Image (spheres, rainbow, N blue to C red):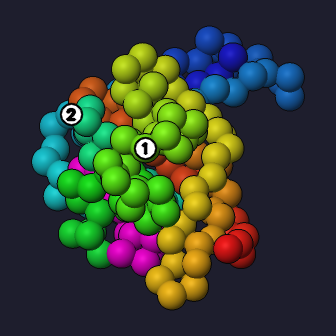
Amino acid sequence: MRRVCAWCQREFDAAIPPGEADEHDVITHGICEACADFFEANEPKSLRRFLNGFQVPILCFDGNGLVITANDAACSLLDKQPSEVEDCLCGEVMECRHARLPGGCGETTHCLGCTLRRTVVTTWETGHSVVNEPTYIDREVTGDGWRRLHLTVSAEKCNDVVLLRIDDLKEIVRG
């Protein structure tokens, strides 16, 4: 089994000696010590600078489910400025149509089944990584109803944050 850092893509903690791997080896993801140390040692502004080194969209959450920061790829995908995502709940950032109901994000009956929310919360509580989890958000579109966003996400807890990577996103026109 080989472990590859989901953030920098370098192999670490290899259980198979180099040269003995074959095409049947299992590859898992995690976070290497260098990336973990960086996340622990840096403030959100430096963290954002680090996350900008990755081409894939990444959102960084605290233990309350609030976005600490997001890289440029995530901000571009969501059509938001960094200041518009910081200190917001996931449903607010993703413009989930249910987040606008009384109680807000995380407090409606729809939130109980929200895989995106559960992925962040469960990763925070258990420390277990999630890889390629399919989910969706019904995104509010001003003056045009809503769109269903189908996402595939991965999450990793690193010290006091959860890093949520958006691996794939497809938008489907709805109501």
- In the picture provided, is 15 more to the left or to the right than 42? right
Above or below 142: residue 46: above
Please give the name of the residue rendered at 45% of the width and 71% of the height, measured from the top-left corner.
Answer: 78
Q: Is residue 113 visible?
A: yes
Task: Work out which quarter of the rendered image holds the N terminus and state it.
Answer: top right
Q: Residues within 10 Å of mark 1 (few under 14, many from 20)?
A: some
- Disc 1 is placed on an element classified as loop
Q: CB atoms at circles 1 and 2 under 8 Å apart?
A: no
Q: Nearer the viewer, residue 61 or 17?
A: 61
Quadrant assignment, res 2: top right
Q: Residues within 10 Å of mark 2 (few under 14, many from 20)?
A: few
Q: Is residue 60 visible?
A: no
Q: Which mark is residue 57?
A: none
Percent position (x, y) of residue 103?
32, 48
- Disc 2 is placed on an element classified as helix
Quadrant assignment, res 156: top left
User: Disc 2 residue type?
Assistant: Glu
Number of numbered labels in the structure image: 2
Percent position (x, y) of residue 95?
44, 65
Q: Residue furthest right?
A: 23
Q: Residue furthest front?
A: 102
User: Disc 1 residue type?
Assistant: Thr
Residue 75 within the magenta-colored segment of the rendering: yes
Q: Which residues fall within the magenta stretch? A: 67-80
Report the residue marked by disc 1: 108
Measured Cα–Cα span from mark 1 to mark 2:
33 Å
Q: Which mark is residue 40?
A: 2
- In the picture provided, is 66 more to the left or to the right than 111? left
Quadrant assignment, res 15: top right
Percent position (x, y) of residue 124?
37, 27
Q: Nearer the viewer, residue 120 or 76?
A: 120
Above or below 122: residue 142: below
